[in-house]
């Protein structure tokens, strides 16, 4: 039986996901719950498991493709079941879709075709193409997994056969070219500019066509010149069909070379490359952008700035650092900040809240889940340390360090980035002093840390160099007034100025 598997909802109401990578290939045997793909959604990469024991029949999506939830991404051959009609995992309707009917008509992917050379393993699409091109699939050398024959192998065999039969008529060669063209991927849309990383175009018929017709010798020339044949204008007409000629291929290749030479000249003149480059706006970057846009245009932001002298905090952390290291834990300043913020939030509960706009209610949270913004190579992630008020310094250090590491190597789960009630961002880690952080909506506040370093401080009318910590606190002005955020910040700074006060909490 052929089993179709749709992309499930891998998040809370997520409408689509980017297929980052396939973990299997067509023809691979898989077991139930074995990961078959990695899908990126929101701020996490999740593994999609196989729903059955069987063999991978067909991969329906390309790596890097954004796939809507509910689209079929992979099909399986399930052993021990009759191959009457394909079924779809989690599908409600019993009527097969158009794609299901197509799969049902094709032979099993693991079907063995007996030939004089023995057994041949080939994909249904490869067998169909071989029939269209008149290729004996038993004579084709497979380059796929376990020697499986692919469509590319069939095309290569067809091209090779045509070049050996030099006495064929022009009409029969044209027929084979048309069959080859029907198997090509259609190319649509206008070509991008050279600044966007595209190949140059020449005058004549455009490359926006359903199929590309060219003689085998022309195809070989395109391969030798490193030219995408589908992008070359078809400039010759034969019996009403537009063909790509060797001259068009060479003209296109020369245009490519001129473009590359122009880029090289720009680089030699001090330019770093093409003047423009387009990068897909999706995945984590798009998720961050949408979240920031929603926060900024929904919650009116106000930011409060201040600085605190933290000599005692530096000394206290230095004393405890060795104790933590003896227990295998790296102690930073962040656990002190976590404790100080939670202690202040208990006195200013409207900063540990959210606004239920539909019911017009302010929701005060009696639990303290603090998110910590982490800059990664893939964008900003916010792992959440749960129940901070119930944990000691070493517990917080250990858990926080683990979450940060998981965020940076992209192994963190969605659950570990949910249910936050307040957020901290440490822009001082890269040398910043003050900033205007955007609230992690629907939370009410976010606390920003500047760089902890020595700055001039007036002590007994004398200027001394002492360690200071700048802070920035942004709040949703619909719920919290400026006076409240100032009082909250003052209390946090008092705990950081005198960290021994945290022992009373």
Image: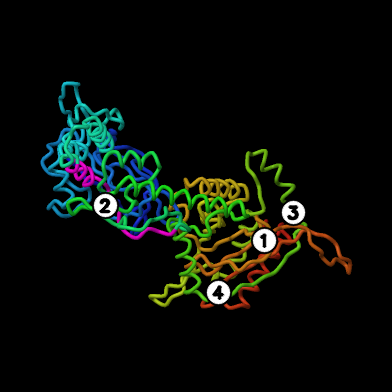
Q: Is residue 54 visible from the viewing direction of this image?
A: no
Q: Is residue 132 above or below residue 435?
A: above
- C-alpha gap between disc 4 and disc 3: 32 Å
Q: Which residues are magenta?
A: 174-193
Quarter of the image with the C terminus in it = bottom right
Q: Residue at x 54, y 72 (%)?
A: 350
Q: Which residue is mark 2?
A: 236
Colour scheme: rainbow
Of the two numbered discs 4 and 3 in the rendering, the one whose residue sits closer to the viewer: 4
Q: Secondary structure at mark 1?
A: loop
Query: How much space separates mark 3 and mark 2, taking CA atoms?
Result: 78 Å
Res 21 → quadrant:
top left
Which disc number belongs to residue 314?
Answer: 3
Specify few, some or many for label 1: CA neighbours under 10 Å numbering under 14, 14-19, or 20 or more.
some
C-alpha gap between disc 2 and disc 4: 63 Å
Q: Determine which residue is flagged by label 1.
A: 432
Rendered location of residue 439, percent (x, y): 53, 67
Whether pointer 3 and pointer 2 mark residues with C-beta atoms closer than 8 Å, the reply is no
Specify whether residue 184 is painted magenta: yes
Visible residue check, residue 206? yes
- The picture places residue 464, in percent across and down from the top left corner, at 85, 62
- Residue 376 counted in the magenta span: no
**Residue closer to the observer: 80 or 111:** 111
Nearest the viewer among 104 and 307 is 104
Disc 4: which residue: 301
Q: CA distance from mark 1 to mark 4?
A: 20 Å
Decide which of tag 3 and tag 2 comes sooner along the chain.
Answer: 2
């Amino acid at each position: 039986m052929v089993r179709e598997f749709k992309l499930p909802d891998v998040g809370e109401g997520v409408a689509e996901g980017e297929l980052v990578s396939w973990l299997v290939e067509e023809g691979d045997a898989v077991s139930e719950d074995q990961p078959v793909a990695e899908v990126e959604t929101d701020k996490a990469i999740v593994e999609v498991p196989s729903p059955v024991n069987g063999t991978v029949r067909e991969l329906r999506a390309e790596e890097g493709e954004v796939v809507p939830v509910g689209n079929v991404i992979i099909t399986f051959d399930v052993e021990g079941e009759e191959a009457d009609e394909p079924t779809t995992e989690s599908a409600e309707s019993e009527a097969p879709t158009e794609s299901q009917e197509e799969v049902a008509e094709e032979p099993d992917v693991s079907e063995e075709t007996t030939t004089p050379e023995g057994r041949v393993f080939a994909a249904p699409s490869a067998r169909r193409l071989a029939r269209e091109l008149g290729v004996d699939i038993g004579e084709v050398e497979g380059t796929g997994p376990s020697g499986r024959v692919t469509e590319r192998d069939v095309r290569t065999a067809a091209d090779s056969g045509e070049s050996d039969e030099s006495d064929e008529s022009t009409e029969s060669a044209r027929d084979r070219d048309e069959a080859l063209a029907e198997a090509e991927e259609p190319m649509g849309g206008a070509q991008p500019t050279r600044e966007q990383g595209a190949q140059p175009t020449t005058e004549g018929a455009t490359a926006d066509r359903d199929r590309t017709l060219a003689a085998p010798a022309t195809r070989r020339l395109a391969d030798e010149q490193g030219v995408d044949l589908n992008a070359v204008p078809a400039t010759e007409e034969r019996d009403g069909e537009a063909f790509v000629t060797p001259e068009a291929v060479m003209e296109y290749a020369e245009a490519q070379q001129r473009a590359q030479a122009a880029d090289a000249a720009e680089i030699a003149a001090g330019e770093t490359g093409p003047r423009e480059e387009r990068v897909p706006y999706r995945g984590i970057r798009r998720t961050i952008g949408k979240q920031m846009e929603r926060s900024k245009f929904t919650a009116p932001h106000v930011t409060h700035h201040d600085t605190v002298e933290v000599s005692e905090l530096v000394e206290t952390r230095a004393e405890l650092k060795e104790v933590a290291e003896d227990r295998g834990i790296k102690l930073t300043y962040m656990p002190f900040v976590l404790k100080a913020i939670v202690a202040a939030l208990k006195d200013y509960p409207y900063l540990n809240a959210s606004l239920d706009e539909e019911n017009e209610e302010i929701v005060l949270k009696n639990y303290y889940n603090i998110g910590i913004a982490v800059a990664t190579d893939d964008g900003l992630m916010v792992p959440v340390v749960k129940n901070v008020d119930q944990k000691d310094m070493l517990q917080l250090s250990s858990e926080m360090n683990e979450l940060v590491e998981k965020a940076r190597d992209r192994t963190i789960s969605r659950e570990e980035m949910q249910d936050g009630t307040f957020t901290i961002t440490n822009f001082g880690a890269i040398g910043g002093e003050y900033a205007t952080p955007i609230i992690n909506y629907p939370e009410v506040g976010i606390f920003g840390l500047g760089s902890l370093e020595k700055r001039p401080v007036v002590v007994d009318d004398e200027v001394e160099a002492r360690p200071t910590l700048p802070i920035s606190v942004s709040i949703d002005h619909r719920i919290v007034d400026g006076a409240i955020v100032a009082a909250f910040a003052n209390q946090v700074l008092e705990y950081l100025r005198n960290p021994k006060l945290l022992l009373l909490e």
